[in-house]
Image (spheres, rainbow, N blue to C red):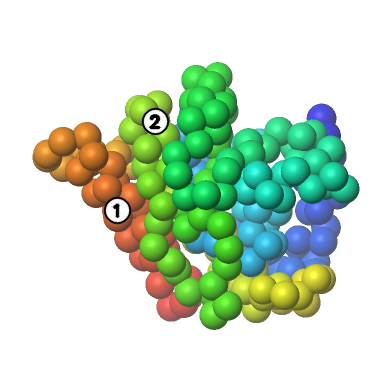
Amino acid sequence: MFYWLVKILFWPLGRAYLGLKVVGKVPRRGPFILAANHCSWLDPVVLGSACARPVRFLISRRLYDRRAQRWFYRWMRTIPVRDSGEADHGAVRQALRALRRGQIVGIFPEGVGLDSGGRLRSPRPGAALIAALAEVPIVPAAIDGTHEAMPKGRLWPRPGRVVVTFGEPFMIGQGQSGGRRNRREGGAEEMMRRISTLMQRQERA
């Protein structure tokens, strides 16, 4: 209920102030990983608003543990993950449990931090690892306009035009050979390639 309340409250802001436009759609049922580019602190709110179903986002443990914000992230049912870059087995288990319950897990594959120019960065292996272990599809998504509305260092967004584009689901390892690690690495590259393709479509639109 809290998740939907936050979403309802943000919807007028997203539509009127940010000009939020949604292209494509996500599967109506079944678990999957929602993977998107990350160039602004506004991205999780925008992506969650654009998605027709609730999303369990992975979030930096450093942000999650801030006393003033912890209650909000807990009520939003986010999954905290360590910032060290090493595998966080506890976070992976939580994500797998959510997927087994038919839920959506939202991941920004580029990990912690933002590029000051809003450019796409190299992925960390977490999204591909979780997708491979859970044997669920990945839905790529591209977010455009949030960097201009709220770049790194800005505390409140400017009015603008934000577009979220959802791509087609795909499975890790489709058409790939080799060991499990090679398939995960290939899956991470394919995920970023699909996100990049969606971003290029947005630029041409």
Residue 183 relative to residue 71: left or right:
left
In the rendered image, which quarter is residue 162 located in?
bottom right
Q: Please count the marks in the image.
A: 2
Residue at image point 56% right, 57% down: 112
* Residue type, mark 2 in image: Val
In the rendered image, which quarter is residue 123 located in?
bottom left
Residue 97 relative to residue 193: left or right:
right
Q: Position of residue 23 (x, y in %)?
A: 53, 58
Q: Nearer the viewer, residue 106 or 164?
A: 106
Q: To which residue does mark 2 refer?
A: 136
For marks 2 and 1 on the same chain, the one whose residue lies earlier in the sequence: 2
Specify few, some or many for label 2: CA neighbours under 10 Å numbering under 14, 14-19, or 20 or more: many
* Residue type, mark 1 in image: Glu
Residue at image point 58% right, 78% down: 116
**Can residue 144 be spotted in the picture?**
yes
From what the image shows, is residue 18 above or below residue 148? Answer: above
Q: Nearer the viewer, residue 92 or 165?
A: 92
Q: Is disc 1 placed on a helix, strand or loop?
A: helix
Q: To which residue does mark 1 refer?
A: 190
Cα–Cα span, label 2 and label 1: 15 Å
Residue 103 relative to residue 132: left or right:
right
Q: Is disc 2 placed on a helix, strand or loop?
A: loop
From what the image shows, is residue 178 above or below residue 185? Answer: above
Q: Nearer the viewer, residue 178 or 36?
A: 178
Residue at image point 16% right, 36% down: 179
